[in-house]
Image (cartoon, grey):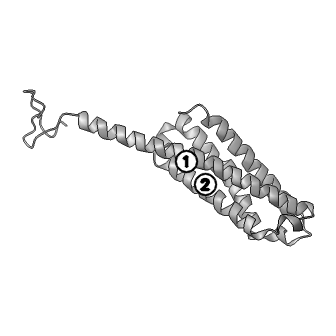
């Protein structure tokens, strides 16, 4: 595993905690219409999902629980989490007013939330890219390993020139 993945996972956890804090501040500010926006709740879900499920699984499963770390599950969780962050920060960016019309702290918190969400999405793009490369390499290595194995004929004999025979049931 790459040595920079674990520090990046820590950055992902910190950014998701920042998202939880910013959305909690936004929800607690009852004086504007953003406090009850579904996009804010969606970003809160993104922060909770990343903190409680995605980062612990992606960081700990390959090392502590390799049996539960499937080669397809890791890229899928990476892709799902990256997609959640992408849709969240874009939906929020579309809905907020222009920067010139943003003169109150709740609006500034929304702008910060967009930046944090975009950076979080970028970190998942990077880690997902390397997860997909790892899957391609592992499949290529498995295919090469299968090609190196001696072929068996219908009669059960090796076709690599050896005179040893084996039954198909023994393979």
The residue depicted at 57 percent of the width and 56 percent of the height is: 80
| Looking at the image, residue 142 lies above or below residue 102 | above
Hey, which residue is sitting farthest front in the picture? 100
Residue 100 located left or right of residue 53: right
Residue designated by label 1: 128
Name the residue beneath numbered marker 2: 82
Q: Is residue 125 left or right of residue 18?
A: left
Q: Secondary structure at mark 2?
A: helix
Residue 42 at x, y = what percent? 71, 63
From the top left corner, tell me how far across and down residue 77 is, in percent: 55, 52
Q: Residue furthest bottom?
A: 33
Answer whether residue 102 is visible to the viewer in this image. Answer: yes
Which residue is depicted at the point 66% across and 54% down?
A: 49
Q: Determine whether label 2 and label 1 are within 8 Å by CB.
A: yes
- Of residues 111 and 12, the one nearer the viewer is 111
Q: Earlier in the sequence, mark 2 or mark 1?
A: 2
């Amino acid at each position: 595993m790459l040595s920079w993945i674990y520090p990046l996972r820590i950055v992902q956890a910190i950014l998701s905690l920042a998202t939880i804090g910013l959305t909690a501040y936004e929800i607690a500010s009852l004086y504007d219409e953003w406090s009850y926006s579904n996009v804010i709740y969606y970003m809160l879900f993104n922060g909770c999902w990343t903190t409680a499920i995605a980062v612990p699984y992606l960081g700990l499963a390959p090392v502590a629980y390799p049996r539960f770390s499937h080669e397809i599950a890791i890229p899928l969780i990476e892709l799902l989490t990256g997609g959640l962050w992408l849709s969240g920060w874009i939906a929020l960016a579309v809905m907020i007013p222009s920067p010139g019309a943003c003169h109150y702290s709740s609006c500034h918190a929304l702008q910060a939330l967009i930046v944090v969400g975009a950076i979080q999405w970028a970190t998942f793009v990077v880690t997902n890219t390397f997860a997909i490369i790892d899957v391609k390499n592992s499949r290529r290595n498995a295919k090469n390993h299968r090609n190196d194995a001696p072929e068996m004929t219908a009669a059960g004999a090796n076709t690599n020139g050896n005179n040893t025979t084996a039954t198909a049931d023994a393979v």
